Amino acid sequence: MTILLFGITKDIVGSSTLSVPTSSATGRKVPRTVKELKQFLGEIYPELNKLSSLAVAVNNNYAEDDQHINSYDEIALIPPVSGG
């Protein structure tokens, strides 16, 4: 599963994309929902947990925590945005 990263999420991870395994070969539970994905990423990158908000888009639509995700979905992390 490939995740697109923007803004501060890109800075935290150190890349504009992140690959998440879609099998349990890593010993971690494979994320199947948006909520599980956030928890999974928060364990690997604890700085993500410090963000005031973190939206997730699945296939170009904002997703709720209970939305199911698949390995072929286009997923993007959208950090809080400030403007001026």
Image (tube, grey):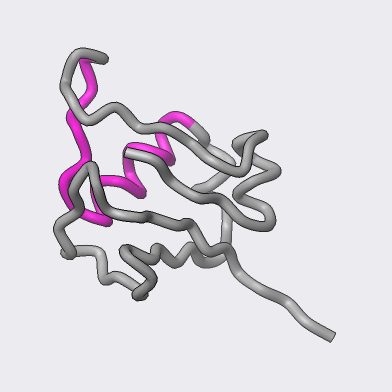
Residue 49 position, x and y percent, is: 50, 48
Of 44 and 6, the residue lying toward us:
6
Q: Quadrant of residue 75?
A: bottom left
Q: Is residue 66 magenta?
A: no
Question: What residue sits 27% from the left and 53% below the top?
Answer: 73
Question: What residue sits 32% from the left and 38% below the top?
Answer: 1
Q: On the picture, is 11 further left or further right than 68?
A: right
Task: Give the residues in magenta.
Answer: 27-44
Question: What residue sits 18% from the left and 29% below the top?
Answer: 29
Is residue 60 shown above or below 46? below
Residue 46 position, x and y percent, is: 52, 37
Is residue 59 shown above or below 8? below
Of 28 and 73, the residue lying toward us:
73
Residue 34 position, x and y percent, is: 26, 56
Kindly report the secondary structure that dominates the magenta region of the rendered protein. Answer: helix
Q: Quadrant of residue 60?
A: bottom left
Q: On the picture, is 66 further left or further right than 3?
A: left
Residue 68 position, x and y percent, is: 14, 57
Question: What residue sits 57% from the left and 57% below the top?
Answer: 51
Q: On the picture, is 63 further left or further right than 42?
A: left
Of 43 and 77, the residue lying toward us:
77
The quarter of the picture where the C terminus appears is: bottom right
In the picture as drawn, the residue positioned furthest to the right comes out as: 84
Is residue 26 shown above or below 62? above
| Total residue callouts | 0
Q: Is residue 39 magenta?
A: yes
In the picture as drawn, the residue positioned furthest to the front comes out as: 72
